[in-house]
Image: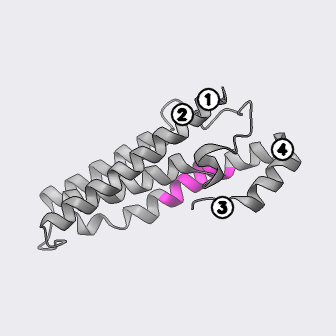
Amino acid sequence: MKWIDVPPVWLLAAAVLAWIQGRHYPLGLSFGGGVWVDLLGGLLVGGGVLLMVLAVYELRRQHTTVLPHRTPSHLVQSGIYSRSRNPIYLGDVLVLAGLILRFDAVLALPLLPLLTWVIERRFILKEEDRLRRTYRTDFARYIRKVRRWV
């Protein structure tokens, strides 16, 4: 089951729930529509995708794994990883925020902290524990320098 327990599956599930809520159960709530909602939603989705692409590029450049259940061969601290320890996960949350705006799914807003919590508990804490055990001193310096999210 580890192959299905990856962040994109959780993001997809949250996005589908947001779409269903916005499409079938709006309950008269709305962000107000208009150009600003579409623009902000597009910027959030685009920014999230850009973060993910930059992160995957840097991991590939360093010849290490992208998969969250594997121990990386290097502690990547360059590129986007010099600004955020988890740019892919941050990108997931930004994409979901943009989709919630785009779907006009006001009641789906609690999915944002829920997705953040799931990602942190299922992936980040385990990854950081693996990195801490593997790259002891370097990881300790890295977490003092770079924040978990932003």
Mark 4 against mark 3, which lies toward the viewer?
3
Q: Which residue is mark 2?
A: 57
Amino acid found under the numbered disc labelled 3: Arg
Sequence-wise, the earlier of marks 4 and 2 is 2
Query: Which comes before the other along the chain, label 4 or label 1?
Result: 1
Q: Which residues are magenta?
A: 116-125
* Amino acid at the residue labelled 2: Tyr
Helix, strand, or loop for circle 1? Answer: helix
3D distance between C-alphas at marks 3 and 1: 22 Å
Quadrant of the rendered structure where residue 145 is? bottom right
**Residue 106 in magenta?**
no
- On the image, the x and y values in percent for residue 135 come to 83, 42
- What label does residue 133 carry, if any? 4
Residue 61's label in the rendered image is: 1
- Which of the marked residues, 4 or 3, is nearer the chain's N terminus? 4
Q: Is residue 144 left or right of residue 54?
A: right
Residue name at image x 83 percent, y 44 percent: 133
